[in-house]
């Protein structure tokens, strides 16, 4: 039998449909007037003739068609039916594709984890989502969960460390580990890819922040704040945080309905506290005056506002149109922007503002005011257990938590009174010094 050649195939023409043999079960079907010719593998099994269409010439060349035919011929000689084997392979491929489509991507896993485990977060998981959308999902969101490896996670962490965000690197790693353990608990994956990564090695060693402003720094702060370019409401926030030991988020989310200035009581609802426990702050006369000044400032603004979009006064620190509380990062940024020694934080800012709030021992943050206030309480003779309750800390030891239910209301009120009186004395002393310098000048 003469084997086919490319030249012979190109010249093949027929008035009727016919099958031209090449050998080993390979045929070329030629049809009248048809440009393309079809490769067919034909075999006989159990007295029946079977045909498998391989492809079209010239899209499938002669050598490729022969190679395909030889593979099918080997199956036939092995006692298999190539048609059945082809159908079996197609079904296996379909099942693999179906299985792959049912296995979630990292992005799909993230939103499932968020809907189940993060729904009760105060912010609804917004902060976690923002972190993932910035660093995690762009890198591995498209991958199937089972395909994620240790190197993927270390690459994400190393990238965050590379931009100097060591703490964020630890936070993101911890969140990724929570998500993959969530997947493992639900048999989405058999092993957690973060399991072999030691958290202590991520971003270096944790450093506990212990910045406390000294009394001389507090006096210096009282001197430089009026010249720092900060809004008066932000200056008041600094003294309120220092005199009440509150967190910045507790202050910015506070409503005037939570504060009874006449009684000197500030109720912090559980949804505003870090540990989910309601808290009561007994305001000293000094703190009451600060809130009074803040209220007066807010009322003046509200009365002078021409825009009808300004909402009624609800929040102690409202956003621009009063519709919701101010983002706590707004105050933090105003403070940090005035502690930048080497860069310009605003084109419109005066040069002096860039370092106006850097104190003797260096930079400080709003949360350091809470720690400073607590430290001052102890220095004024307040018992540590009373200070812990002023901070709304949860008792670590279970027995004490269960059996010691004394609420320390009187002691807490006295602690805040001592702190307020001390800060008032510092403030008055600074005012006297300023007046004396003015007279000398």
Image (tube, rainbow, N blue to C red):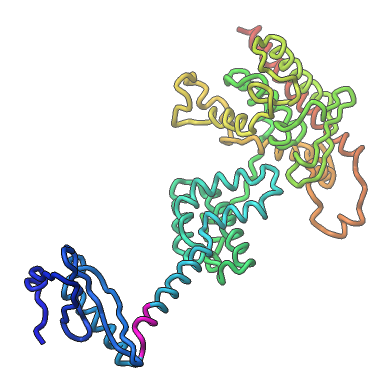
The answer to whether 429 is drawn above or below residue 436 in the figure is below
Q: Is residue 282 left or right of residue 183?
A: right
Q: Is residue 25 above or below residue 137?
A: below
Q: Nearer the viewer, residue 403 or 308?
A: 308
Q: Picture quarter containing residue 35?
A: bottom left
Residue situated in front as seen by the camera: 358 or 390: 390
User: Is residue 428 among the parts visible in the rendering?
Assistant: no
Magenta region: which residues?
A: 80-86
Residue for point 19% across, 77% down: 19
- The quarter of the picture where residue 298 lies is top right
Please indicate whether residue 67 sits to the left or right of residue 430 in the image: left
Give residue 71's position: percent from left, percent from top: 27, 83
**The quarter of the displayed image where residue 304 is located:** top right
Placement of 431 over or under 161, stated as above or below: above
The reply to whether the magenta stretch includes residue 247 is no
Question: Where is residue 352 drawn, in percent x and y?
Answer: 50, 21
Tell me where residue 74 appears, x and y as whole percent.
28, 88
Instruction: Give the quarter of the figure containing the N terminus.
Output: bottom left
Q: Residue at x 87, y 60 (%)?
A: 399
Q: Between residue 11 and residue 202, name the one nearer to us.
A: 11
Q: Which of these two is toward me, 185 or 167?
A: 185
Q: Main secondary structure of the magenta part?
A: helix
Residue at the image position 17 percent from the left and 71 percent from the top: 16
Q: Is residue 84 magenta?
A: yes
Q: Position of residue 319 (x, y in %)?
A: 65, 25
């Amino acid at each position: 039998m003469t084997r086919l050649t490319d030249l012979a195939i190109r010249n093949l023409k027929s008035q009727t449909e016919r099958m031209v043999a090449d050998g080993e079960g390979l045929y070329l079907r030629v049809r009248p007037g048809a440009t393309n010719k079809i490769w067919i593998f034909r075999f006989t099994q159990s007295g029946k003739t079977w045909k498998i269409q391989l492809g079209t010439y010239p899209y499938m060349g002669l050598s490729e068609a022969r190679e395909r035919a030889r593979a099918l011929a080997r199956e036939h000689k092995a006692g298999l039916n190539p048609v059945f084997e082809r159908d079996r392979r197609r079904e296996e491929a379909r099942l693999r594709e179906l299985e792959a489509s049912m296995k979630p991507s990292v992005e799909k896993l993230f939103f499932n984890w968020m809907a189940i485990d993060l729904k009760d977060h105060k912010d609804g998981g917004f902060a976690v989502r923002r972190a993932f959308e910035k660093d995690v999902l762009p890198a591995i969101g498209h991958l199937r969960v089972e395909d994620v490896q240790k190197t993927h996670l270390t690459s994400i962490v190393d990238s965050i460390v590379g931009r100097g965000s060591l703490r964020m690197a630890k936070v993101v790693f911890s969140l990724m580990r929570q998500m993959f353990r969530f997947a493992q608990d639900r048999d989405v994956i058999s092993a957690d890819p973060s399991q072999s990564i030691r958290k202590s090695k991520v971003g270096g060693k944790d450093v506990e922040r212990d910045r406390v402003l000294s009394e001389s720094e507090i006096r210096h702060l009282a001197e430089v704040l009026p010249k720092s370019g900060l809004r008066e409401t932000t200056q008041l926030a600094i003294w309120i945080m220092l005199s009440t030991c509150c967190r910045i988020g507790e202050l910015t989310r506070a409503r005037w309905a939570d504060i009874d200035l006449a009684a000197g009581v500030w109720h912090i609802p559980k949804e505003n506290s870090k540990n989910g426990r309601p808290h009561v702050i007994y305001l000293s006369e000094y703190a009451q005056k600060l809130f009074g000044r803040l209220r007066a400032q807010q009322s003046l603004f509200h009365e002078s506002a021409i825009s009808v979009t300004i909402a009624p006064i609800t929040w102690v620190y409202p956003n621009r149109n009063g519709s919701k509380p101010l983002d706590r990062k707004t105050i933090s940024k105003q403070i940090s922007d005035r502690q930048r020694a080497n860069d310009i934080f605003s084109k419109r800012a005066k040069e002096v503002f860039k370092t106006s709030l850097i104190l003797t021992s260096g930079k400080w943050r709003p949360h350091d005011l809470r720690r400073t206030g607590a430290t001052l309480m102890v220095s004024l003779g307040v018992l540590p257990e009373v200070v812990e309750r002023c901070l709304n800390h949860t008792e670590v030891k279970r027995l004490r938590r269960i059996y010691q239910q004394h609420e320390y209301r009187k002691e807490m009120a006295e602690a805040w009174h001592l702190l307020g009186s001390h800060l008032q004395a510092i403030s008055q002393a600074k005012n006297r010094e300023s007046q004396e310098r003015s007279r000398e000048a």
